[in-house]
Image (spheres, helix red, strand yellow):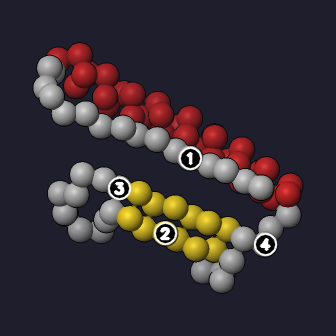
Amino acid sequence: MSNKIRLLQYGNLTNNSDAPFLEQAVKVDGIHKDSAKYLSKLSVDIWKEVYKKIIDEVQPISDKEGGKHKITFDVYCYYE
């Protein structure tokens, strides 16, 4: 991985821990504005795919359950 790309990991993707959170980030430095805009658009396109998959799984669970727990799925992308 380039020294301009940093993977920040909070939470764990590789073990079976029961951590209540997952936070991952990829930070890229030293790119041109057009590249930043392209990658921002790419993140929107990927989110649209993920959103559909999440809703397909969440909707039936939400419809039949009445528990006290909650979960939030989100994506954050910012460029400057």
Residue at 69% x, 77% y is 4
Q: CA distance from mark 2 to mark 4?
A: 17 Å
Left or right placement of residue 71 versus residue 6 in this view:
left
Residue at 40% x, 40% y is 73
Q: Quadrant of residue 28?
A: bottom right
The answer to which of 50 and 26 lies nearer the viewer is 26
Asked if residue 67 is positioned above or below residue 64 in the image, the reply reads below
The tag earlier along the polypeptide, 1 or 2, is 2
The tag earlier along the polypeptide, 3 or 4, is 3
The tag earlier along the polypeptide, 2 or 4, is 2
Q: Which residue is mark 4?
A: 30
Mark 2 element type:
strand
The three-letter amino acid code for the residue at tag 3 is: Leu
The three-letter amino acid code for the residue at tag 4 is: Gly
Q: Any mark on residue 11, and which?
A: none
Q: Quadrant of residue 9?
A: bottom left
- Residue furthest to the top: 63
Residue 6 percent location from the top left of the image: 58, 74
Left or right placement of residue 13 versus residue 51 in this view:
left
The tag earlier along the polypeptide, 2 or 3, is 2
Q: Residues within 10 Å of mark 1 (few under 14, many from 20)?
A: few
The answer to which of 67 and 48 lies nearer the viewer is 67
Q: Which residue is mark 3?
A: 22
Asked if residue 18 is positioned above or below residue 60 in the image, the reply reads below
The tag earlier along the polypeptide, 1 or 4, is 4
Q: Which residue is mark 2?
A: 8
Mark 1 element type:
loop
Mark 4 element type:
loop
Q: Which residue is mark 1?
A: 76
Q: CA distance from mark 1 to mark 3?
A: 13 Å
Residue 44 percent location from the top left of the image: 63, 40
The answer to whether mark 1 and mark 3 are in CB contact below 8 A is no
